[in-house]
Image: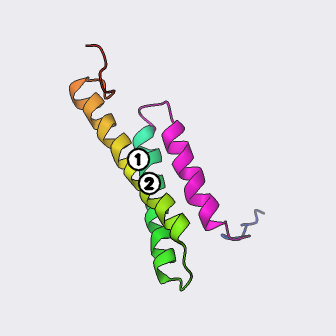
């Protein structure tokens, strides 16, 4: 007989959650896994951003961090598409 663990034994820390997914995405070296890591981080960032919007507290520091992380992931995603589509290196001033 198998037992099914509760879906949420303890609620994860929302700040730690998006930060871990973001860090995993920017540290990913496998190009096949990278789009999935980016997408998971983007979803977590959007979810946390909505949570912060609904909170009455002033969360300026975290909101700024979320903005920076979102822009970084978009840039990484763009570079990945360039590298995949054109075989170009997305580093400024890279040798041909």
Count the marks: how many? 2
Pinpoint residue 31: horizontal percent, then vertical percent: 42, 31
Q: What's the residue at 47%, 31% (across, down)?
A: 30
Front residue of 77/30: it is 77
Pinpoint residue 61: horizontal percent, then vertical percent: 54, 65
Q: What's the residue at 32%, 36% (across, down)?
A: 79
Pinpoint residue 9: horizontal percent, then vertical percent: 73, 70
Q: What's the residue at 25%, 24% (across, down)?
A: 88
Q: Are marks 1 and 2 in contact (CB under 8 Å)?
A: yes
**Is residue 32 inside the magenta stretch?**
yes
**Is residue 60 inside the magenta stretch?**
no
Image quadrant occupied by the N terminus: bottom right
Identify the mark at residue 68; answer none if there is no mark.
Answer: 2
Q: CA distance from mark 1 to mark 2?
A: 6 Å
User: In what element is the residue under mark 1?
Assistant: helix
Q: Which residues are drawn in magenta?
A: 9-33
Q: Residue furthest left?
A: 86
Q: Quadrant of residue 57?
A: bottom right
Image quadrant occupied by the C terminus: top left
Q: Residue furthest bottom?
A: 56
Q: Which residue is mark 1?
A: 72
């Amino acid at each position: 007989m198998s037992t099914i663990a509760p879906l949420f034994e303890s609620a994860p820390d929302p700040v730690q959650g998006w930060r871990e997914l973001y860090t995993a995405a920017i540290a990913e070296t496998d190009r096949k896994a990278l789009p999935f890591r980016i997408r998971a981080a983007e979803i977590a960032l959007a979810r946390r951003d909505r949570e912060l919007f609904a909170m009455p507290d002033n969360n300026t520091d975290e909101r700024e961090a979320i903005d920076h992380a979102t822009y970084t992931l978009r840039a990484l995603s763009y570079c990945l598409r360039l590298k995949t589509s054109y075989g170009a290196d997305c580093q400024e001033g890279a040798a041909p």
